Image (tube, helix red, strand yellow):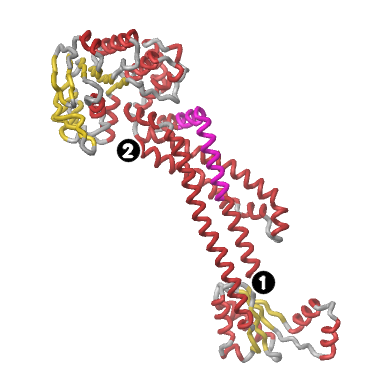
Amino acid sequence: MLTNFTRIFRFAVNDLSRNKGISIAAIFVLVVTIMLVTGLFFFHGVSQFLISEIQDKIDITAYFKDETQEQDILNVRDEILKMSPNIKNVEYVSKDQAMLAFNEKHKDNAVLARALDELGTNPFLPSLNIKTNGDPAQYAEVSNVLQTANFSKFIDKVDFSQKRDTIEKVFSITSNINNFGIALGIILSIVAILVVFNTIKLAVDSSKDEISTMRIVGASDWFIRGPFIIQGAIYGFIAFAICFLLSALSAYILSPKIGAVLPGFDSFDYFLSNIWILVLIQLVFGMGVGVISSFIVVRKYLDV
Amino acid sequence: MIKFENVTKIYPPNTAVLQDISFQVKEGEFVSIVGKSGAGKTTLTRLILGLEEPTYGDVFFKDKNLRTADSYEIQEVRRSIGCIYQDYKLLPAKTVYENVAYIMEVEGKGYGKIKKEVPKVLELIGLEDKMDNFPKELSGGEQQRLAIARALVNSPQVIIADEPTGNLDPYNSYEVIYMLEKINKAGATVILLTHDREIVNKLSKRVITLVGGKIIRDEAEGRFII
């Protein structure tokens, strides 16, 4: 068994080094397709970053009646947080914080400052800023719950109806980006698999007569198939190693440029934090497609 | 050793290459199967090697019906047969040494035995100086000798030579036939498929004549008559 395996491995390495042209072509095609898949992975990272950036800018605000006690507001906040795991954040803004934020925002506007002074009191209401997963239905649900008897006694108004259009637009844009990403991913992955399959097919096709001779002399199917499968795995592994270095290098070099276009997104950080997933995707894609393609193509010739 | 029982082979849609063929080859025999191109000689070898199944009838190798044999048994049959072809069917990506060693590796023989046996066989056929060459670096005659070395290395019980002299000059052709006779004298069964009249007539051995997929003559000391 071990002798057979070492022989099969030796055949694979010999064939690979003796057919340099075909081997280099197969590895090159694998590198291109793995980089395509890696590109999709980075595209997914960028789109998720953009989606969360946009969703972060969307919230609804529940304004409480002036006389509501802070403890009551905090109780409402806790209740909302318990409602659904899709509630991402509920931020309490007191009257004073609202006033401070207003002053900070309009510090250069003397007219507004004077108007506030003339009022003599703090006109702002305490509020809760609520962020969900971005789904308009989720915001609508929160808004409805806040208007039920338990909460409505404390609440002055909820600004969901004013923001509804914006929330729906943002949600539709983010859903479209997600769907487009999935469709693009599926199409390009199929193209990549077909391209690799055809390249491996060309590599094995050149050994068609050899396979038939091996059958005639009584070699078992695995003795014939083994070297081609191992060659497919070696092609995949070499392509993976090249792609891994290439993607690390490009994520590092392009990081400042991408950061300038997408502030807050660091491509090298993204690479490092997803390094194992990326290794898995590149390795499984490279070696997996290499091995499976070899297996299918050789089987075709063994059946003849 | 080998028995054909009412064998008919029809390729789709309706091309009958062999029609109701029955014959038997005994152990140690030297049989020439003659016929024009397209008479069904190559199909006959493919049936013996289990590369094809007869449409009707049965082929037996040492009493084993190949139709019912599993893939492991078929491999065993192929390993008991050494094949020599007109187009040599060498492994182009392997050296002369590796081409011969491959046959022993297929059988799972140890490295020590392979290292000892392969140079011996190559010496016997005069290719010991070209062990590290690839087949494309050899002449036609050398390639055919390599094919013979490969067929012999496992001391098979049967040698099938399908037009082994088809691509060779008269000198190399007689050398190949001489080798086949020697192998036969050493005890192996030899089946020679050819359309070379002169060679068959000189051999004075059993001749089976195929015409249009049918056996028209089977003589113990036959001649090439079509």
In the rendered image, residue A191, in percent from the top left (x then y), is placed at 49, 49
Q: Is residue B193 left or right of residue A15?
A: left
**Amino acid type assigned to the residue bearing label 2 in the image:** Asp
In the rendered image, residue A274, in percent from the top left (x then y), is placed at 60, 54
Q: Which residue is mark 1?
A: A57
Quadrant of the drawing holding the C terminus of chain B: top left
Q: Which residue is mark 2?
A: A303
Say yes or no: labels 2 and 1 on the same chain.
yes
Q: Is residue A13 rendered magenta in the image?
A: yes
Q: Main secondary structure of the magenta part?
A: helix
Q: Is residue B198 rendered magenta in the image?
A: no
Identify whether A291 is placed above or below A53: above
In the rendered image, residue B56, in percent from the top left (x then y), is placed at 16, 35
Identify whether A17 is placed above or below A139: above
Q: Element under label 2?
A: helix
In the rendered image, residue B67, in percent from the top left (x then y), is placed at 20, 35
Task: Choose top left, top right, bottom left or bottom right for residue A218.
Answer: top left
Is residue A133 visible in the rendered image? The answer is no
Kindly identify the residue that appears in the image at 39 percent across and 35 percent down: A225
Q: Earlier in the sequence, mark 2 or mark 1?
A: 1
Task: Choose top left, top right, bottom left or bottom right for residue B221.
Answer: top left
Task: Choose top left, top right, bottom left or bottom right for residue B5.
Answer: top left
Quadrant of the drawing holding the N terminus of chain B: top left
Which label belongs to residue A15?
A: none
Q: Residues within 10 Å of mark 2 (few under 14, many from 20)?
A: few
Q: CA distance from mark 2 to mark 1?
A: 61 Å
The one nearer the camera, A98 or A70, is A98
The magenta segment is: A9-37
Q: Element under label 1?
A: loop
Kindly identify the residue that appears in the image at 70 percent across and 91 percent down: A67
Kindly identify the residue that appears in the image at 28 percent across and 13 percent down: B180
